């Protein structure tokens, strides 16, 4: 079984959307196998998004992701990485499929309610960031 990471971003947490987003994921048949709520500091957020370092949106993205608590969600299932990305909708909520998480809860490209690991990038690194063994600074709860 494949695993992936979804992050409920600070904007959706502040809007009390955690339960609704988790309900939609479970209703769609995605198995939630881990949850972790935390607030990232600047260094940790910069490390998590290091793949984007040097891009114009990197600084504002780090600032946004440290603006409040987030919820990391580990999901498991067949072809889950592709299916979750499709389920949440495209990055820009204005262009996301009606009824998708980003269309319903996102307000901008950055404040789009959720981060879903990109299957073409290092999903395992992202998962380990929040759901590592107990000796890691980002230990799973």
Image (cartoon, rainbow, N blue to C red):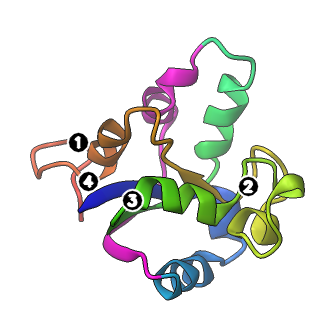
Nearest to the observer: residue 76 or residue 22: 76
Residue ID for mark 1 = 137
Q: Position of residue 54 (x, y in %)?
A: 63, 11
Look at 45% across and 42% down and name the residue there.
Answer: 119
In this rendering, does residue 7 appear at all?
no
Say left or right for 42 vs 96: left
Residue ID for mark 3 = 79
In this rendering, the count of numbered labels is 4
Q: Alpha carbon of mark 2 to alpha carbon of mark 1: how far?
A: 27 Å
Q: Alpha carbon of mark 1 to alpha carbon of mark 3: how far?
A: 29 Å
In the image, is residue 113 above or below residue 61? Answer: below
User: Of helix, strand and loop, which one carries label 1?
Assistant: loop
Look at 26% across and 53% down and name the residue there.
Answer: 131
Q: Position of residue 88 (x, y in %)?
A: 64, 63
Say left or right for 102 vs 35: right
Q: Alpha carbon of mark 3 to alpha carbon of mark 4: how far?
A: 20 Å
Look at 31% across and 36% down and name the residue there.
Answer: 125
> Does 46 lie within the magenta span?
yes
Could you classify mark 3 by the number of other residues whose Cα lies within 10 Å: few (under 14), some (14-19), or many (20 or more)? Answer: few
Residue ID for mark 2 = 112
Residue that lies at the very extreme toward the top in this rendered image: 54
Is there CB contact under 8 Å for labels 2 and 1?
no
Please report whichever mark, 2 or 4, sits nearer to the chain's N-terminal start. 2
Q: Which mark is residue 131?
A: 4
């Amino acid at each position: 079984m494949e695993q992936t990471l979804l992050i409920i971003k600070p904007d959706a947490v502040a809007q009390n959307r955690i339960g609704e987003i988790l309900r939609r994921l479970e209703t769609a048949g995605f198995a939630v196998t881990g949850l972790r709520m935390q607030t990232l500091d600047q260094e940790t957020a910069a490390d998590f998004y290091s793949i984007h370092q040097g891009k114009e949106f990197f600084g504002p993205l780090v600032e946004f992701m440290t603006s409040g608590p987030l919820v990391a969600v580990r999901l498991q299932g067949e072809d889950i990485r592709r299916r979750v990305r499709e389920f949440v909708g495209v990055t820009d909520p204005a262009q996301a499929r009606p009824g998708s998480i980003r269309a319903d809860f996102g307000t901008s490209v950055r404040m789009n309610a959720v981060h879903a690991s990109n299957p073409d990038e290092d999903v395992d690194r992202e998962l380990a960031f929040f759901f590592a063994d107990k000796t890691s600074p980002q230990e799973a709860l």
